[in-house]
Image (spheres, coloured by chain):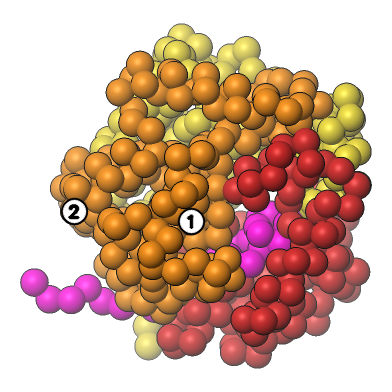
Chain colours: A red, B yellow, C orange
């Protein structure tokens, strides 16, 4: 049996607005570009915060509804806990040279990855091109997304 | 280099039971059909609420564990907040002609998309074919899902 | 039109640390192996709890931020509620012969599926090979993941 053809393209959808919801997509896009794989990122629903000028520096870890943190459920909802956990995780990421979300996205765009916002979501949250960081190339429809994704793998995160 | 072959089929899995967890899958299925792409939807775990006769009209936005909403974490857990946020988002969707979940799913089924429930999940939550809306064609196993998904893209939402 | 070629391989990413976040990936991997489909599982972020020696027996249902449970939002955050719901769901799973997470993962590994941890996440949470169950074959980079995923479907859960 011959080896399967390598992956040539990934189309990564970022749909969540929490730090732990956004990083996996960024890490997968960055890892793809490092291997010479074409990568496009599509930001939809709350995931659009990652490319929103006023919001992308204020993204937090989801501390409630996240048993993975191993905190008592009721602790996660206390005022300040989400900010504290976010601060701790950001510090650990800094040690590992994983950049904060705004710098990371800029870095990924610099590798030649495409960044796009979802039209339906932008309309829903009344966001326009000027609300997004300059690296966002366009606001596109689902149909345009499928066109761009042809010949690759769709990864919904 | 020639253009890659267009996407011919998408198999969209809906696994979450919140409004913000269900809509992305519906929008992607609807967008696929609008482009002439074959689309099948598979509802599993809490995502089965979207096709459950008694539940599909009562689906809410997840307001806790969702930093994307930019509410103080502890506010999201107050009685009534989830309903209020849901109501606000539904109003915005109405303005954009995005239908409520029950109508949207009916509309997607009318375009020729297939709707299926996951057997393991239906067994787990003790649901049977008659609990689901009429548009659901069958309750199928994971193996049958993979058969139907052949030749297309699997999108887990 | 001839039937599309069957799916030959699935690469399932488990990124969440809750019972309801982990099971779908396990069920899809197990279902793939039952059909003779090659399956690899990659555990990243909080999903690594599923293969963590000290944590994989203590995984809970996310009861807040999960409107799918149909509990009043504020109830989900009470001490003990998450454990109670988890216990109830585990009992139902037992009736259906769905094994608890540790046994299920062992069973899936026994079918020949590969288990891998994500390097970036392991570094972030300061976990090493000895923290994971013996069935985990390796800690790999995103680039190595894409290599292993070639010729199949990537499913991010």
Q: Chain of mark 2?
A: C
Q: Residue at x 28, y 45 (%)?
A: C106
Viewer-side residue, A103 vs A91: A91
Chain holding disc 1: C
Secondary structure, mark 2, is loop
Relative image position of residue A108 (x, y in whole percent): 63, 83
Residue C50, compared with residue A9, is above or below; it is above
Horizontal side of A101 relative to B54 (left or right) equals: right
Depth check, front residue: A92 or C34 = A92
The structure residue drawn at horizontal position 41% and vertical position 46%, both measured from the top left corner, is C25
x and y, in percent, of residue A116 in the image = 68, 70
Say which residue appears at 29% left-offset and 65% top-offset.
Answer: C137
Q: Are marks 2 and 1 in contact (CB under 8 Å)?
A: no
| Location of residue C155 in the rendering, given as x and y in whole percent from the top left corner | 42, 55
Q: Is residue B6 left or right of residue B50?
A: left
Question: Quadrant of the rendered structure where residue A137 is?
Answer: bottom right
**Dot 1, how many residues are within 10 Å of its Cα: few (below 14), some (14-19), or many (20+)?**
many
Which residue position is annotated with label 1?
C48
| Mark 2 residue crowding within 10 angstroms, few (<14) / some (14–19) / many (20+) | few
The residue that disc 2 covers is C112
């Amino acid at each position: 049996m011959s080896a399967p053809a390598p992956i040539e393209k990934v189309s990564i959808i970022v749909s969540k607005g929490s730090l732990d919801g956004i990083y996996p997509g960024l890490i997968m896009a960055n890892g793809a570009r490092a291997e010479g794989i074409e990568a496009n990122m599509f930001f939809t629903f709350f995931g659009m915060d990652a490319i929103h000028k006023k919001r992308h520096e204020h993204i937090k870890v989801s501390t409630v509804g996240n048993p993975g943190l191993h905190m008592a459920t009721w602790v996660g909802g206390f005022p300040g806990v989400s900010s504290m956990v976010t601060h701790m995780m950001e510090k650990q990421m800094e040690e590992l040279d994983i950049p904060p979300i705004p710098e990371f996205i800029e870095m990924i765009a610099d590798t030649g990855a495409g960044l796009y916002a979802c039209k339906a979501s932008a309309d829903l949250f009344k966001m326009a091109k000027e609300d997004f960081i300059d690296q966002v190339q366009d606001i596109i429809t689902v149909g345009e997304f499928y066109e761009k994704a042809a010949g690759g793998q769709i990864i919904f995160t």
